[in-house]
Amino acid sequence: MIRLLDTLSFLLQWGYVFVIFRMLHVFLPLRKGRILRLAAFVAAGYLFNAIIYPNDFAGLFGAFLGSFVYIGLFHREHWAKKLTAVLVFYPAFIAVNFLMQDIGSRCFFSVSSIQAESPLTWTREQLLLSTTFYTLSQVFRLLFWLLSWKMMEKYLRKAVFHLTARMWFMVDILMLAPFLAVSTMIYFEQENWLLVYLICGSSLFSSFGCMYLASYICASVETSFYAQELERKQSYYRERMKEEERVRSVYHDMKNHLLVLERQMQTPETAGMIRKLQQEVAAYEDYVHTGSDILDIILKEKAAAAREKHMELSVTADLGGMDFLEPLDISTIFGNGLDNAMEASEKLPREERVILVKAGRVQNFFSVLMENNCQAEEEAPGKGTTKEDAFFHGFGISNMRKAAEKYGGQLHSRCENGKFQLKILIPVPPGAFGEAAR
């Protein structure tokens, strides 16, 4: 029975390590390489299972130094964010480990006849009881971190990007409070265990609260930036649509004038000049007509930019009957998608700069497919930005997903074998395409 409990405790320990390892991985990306990641997981098993006892300065300092070295060695990010990870996770796992160990020990000594100071000459029944309490402490520790993971996952993911080093430094200053509280209380306080428990609990709340604060700041910044972007685009496309109407009018008259001049001018030189002008004017009709004025303008601009950058842009789109999609959401989906595709294509040789866009109705869904080649080592867009001004970039995929979810749709993206693919499916509401009339 004792051996069975020991085996169960071992499995619970590594289950706990996996959960906290996963939480840290979401917050800070691991360095690449399977061997390095395996080494990171094994090292995490020793670090996160550290137990600190009262007056154990070497243990406290060693666990802190080990956390700093571990994160610096195995994870990627700037120093301010790495420091945040240390100040968040170190007090959390130290406090939980101490609480579970101390509570388990107190429960064991309270129900057994053994005194804490007595020699370790226990009976088999007492060893079984001790192992049982130890295993239960492992169970509760794992349950605590599973619950924490469930509650904090979305906040950890939201806090991953969009904060500058200075903002992370401000979070670090706030995190000093729970860090110092846990360290000093565990080291100095021995008699008043209730006070130690309260301080450890408060430190856990503060650690996770700071992550929620960082997530809230990220969400606020993103919402504010998105609102400004929508306002700017709305004004821009309003002016472009007026310009398109004027150009179409001029184009119609110009085409007729050139036909008249072609009949009147008989010299080869003038006839050649007129034909050249006709070709240039006719190029106005070469862009894709999708049934959406906003999308027509976007595709016309992106096609011109693609030609300048020697990219092959292939578009098949039919938005006829998609009046339920707001113009700015169309702009968000296709504008950001094409910008990401073109940015990725710029890094490739000219012969690989190919972008494919398909959009239209598929059964009861509006479907959007975007494909482009990309560098094999790149991560899929949506996990951040490679631009230097990361605070004002990196919202593209996030905003596209919000636009799709606004209509009950979904966005999926993946990057495999040097090809990035983005898919959006939005259910077509009843009444679109005249269903209500049938």
Image: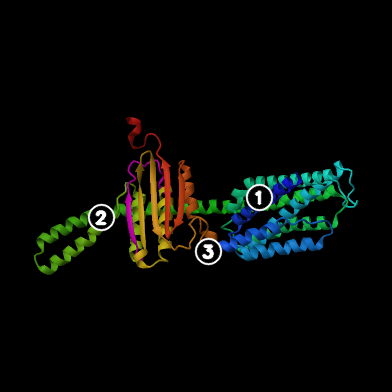
Nearer to us of marks 2 and 1 is 1
Q: Is residue 326 magenta?
A: yes
- Which of 327 and 313 lies nearest the eye of the viewer? 313
In the rendered structure, the answer to whether residue 13 lies left or right of residue 223 reads: right
- Residue, x 46% and y 48% (percent of image)? 411
The residue that disc 1 covers is 15
- Amino acid type of disc 1? Gly
- Residue, x 39% and y 53% (percent of image)? 370
The residue that disc 2 covers is 285
In the rendered structure, the answer to whether residue 72 lies left or right of residue 278 reads: right
- Amino acid type of disc 2? Glu
Can I make out residue 234 in this image? no
- Look at the numbered disc 3 and give the secondary structure of its residue: loop
Precedes in sequence: disc 3 or disc 1: 1
Precedes in sequence: disc 2 or disc 1: 1
Precedes in sequence: disc 2 or disc 3: 2
